[in-house]
Amino acid sequence: MFEQLPPHDIQAEESVVASVMVDPEAMDKVAGFLQARDFFREINAWTYEACYALWDRQESINQVTVAHELDRRGRLEDVGGHTYLSELILNLPTPIGVEHFGGIVKRDATYRQMIGAAMNIAQVAYQGGPELDGALAKAESLIYALRSGEQSRDFVHISKYLDTFLEAPDADSVTPYQGHVRTGLSDLDHLLGGLNPSDLLIVAARTGVGKTALMLNFARNAAVGSHAKVAIFSLEMAGEQLAQRILAAESRVDSARLRLGLHSEIEESRLMHAHGILSNVDIYVDDTAMVQIPELRAKTMRLKRDHGLDLVIVDYLQLISGNRSDNRVQEISYITRSLKQLARELNVPIIAGSQLSRAPEQRQPHIPMLSDLRESGSIEQDADVVLFIYREEMYMRRDEWEALHPDREREPYPQGKAQIIVAKHRNGPTGVIEVRFRDHISKFEDFEGIPSGEPSYS
């Protein structure tokens, strides 16, 4: 069995490379899932690698530029010179099927990886030894590594996730998107002037304070309130969980009750109404666990071309796969710089969540500052806006507060109160915005914008 050539399709490989050289949009379609190492024939891999390098530098890809890039790498003659490139293009019937041919190349590469894993497992078995569990663990890890490498997914409209909760009725009409994207928090919109195209915004907070909730609020408010088209990269949370949180916030139904199916008839009605609204707006979710910058760029470029795009949200920064540098600060610098460049290229705001160090917990008061950003130098430098979330109730119990503030009527315990701190604003003022946070539905809202008659979660 191992004497025959491993799975490969030279025609599919050549079709991919030729398509990329003749179709300006072809690389956007395959760059997110196809790497040079996936090609079986070495000269095809080298040529695709040259195309990928040009695409990554945002340069034109054609026969001339690819030949120049191959020559710069000392490989033009190795691949067959200009004759090889010309024949590739001449033999290409149509560039329309680049994704199909790219899928074939990727599939065969995976099969070859399976063969490699099988040979490694056979070697483990031949070595044997008294520790069977250890050998089985090695075999399982090889298979797991192979499968985890194939888990890259793509954008899915949020309605696909919402349909797991209930069927969608007709949605209320929404106002068409015009101008800058709005956050939906009036004071914050007034301070920032909305979310400006080409800006990189960082939302940072300690774990559990609500950075994901705030970014999802921004996504919902932009899509529902302005009919903006929103892309969400959910690196930490599965798409179903994310949809559940948005649905709970929109319907104002306790997320725990929603998850367990314990909502009342009144809540069921609110859920139906919320489901209808959210299913008919343009929110697209990609819940690939470890997305890389080139993949993120390719997917957003394709989404903008196919459906339009007004806002990108990444949850969160430290989970993006960078340039695999041994220096984590350099890796984060590459990621933030790339996100800023992508925001300018797409001409849309990009909001990325970020972790904070433990420094706020070790000082009084616990209000975060720019130096608390993990790998803060590059994040602070590349970001146009940095937002911190501060909730005093996270650091002080009610009894501790009341002991320090005997005048309870004048200074009540700050449950449900949050501050959004604009710590950096490249093109405008900084400041502090006070909002209400409803923990049970993971929702930030203006104090004066709370509907009457709604249940209180405070």
Image (cartoon, grey):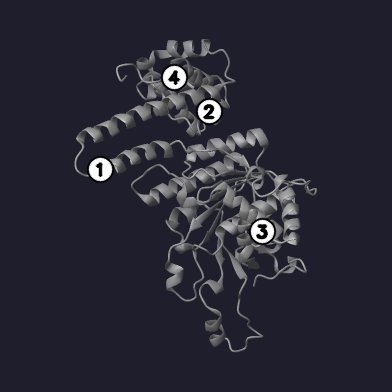
Q: Quadrant of the C terminus?
A: bottom right
Residue contact at pointers 3 and 4, CB within 8 angstroms: no
Q: Nearer the viewer, residue 138 or 358?
A: 138
Label at residue 15: none
Label located before the other in sequence (3 or 2): 2
Q: CA distance from mark 1 to mark 2?
A: 46 Å
Looking at the picture, which amino acid does disc 4 mark? Ala
Residue contact at pointers 1 and 2, CB within 8 angstroms: no
Identify the residue at image location x=49%, y=43%. Answer: 338
Label at residue 27: 2
Q: Nearer the viewer, mark 1 or mark 2?
A: 1
Label at residue 249: 3
Q: Nearer the viewer, residue 260 or 306?
A: 260
Q: CA distance from mark 1 to mark 4?
A: 53 Å
Query: On screen, 268 above or below 26?
Result: below
Please state the horizontal and vertical placement of residue 151, each as a whole percent of the image: 47, 38
| Farthest residue, direction bottom | 406
Looking at the picture, which amino acid does disc 2 mark? Met
Q: CA distance from mark 3 to mark 2?
A: 38 Å
Determine crowd level at label 2: few under 14, some 14-19, many 20+ residues with C-alpha closer than 10 A: many
| Farthest residue, direction right | 173
Looking at the picture, which amino acid does disc 1 mark? Leu
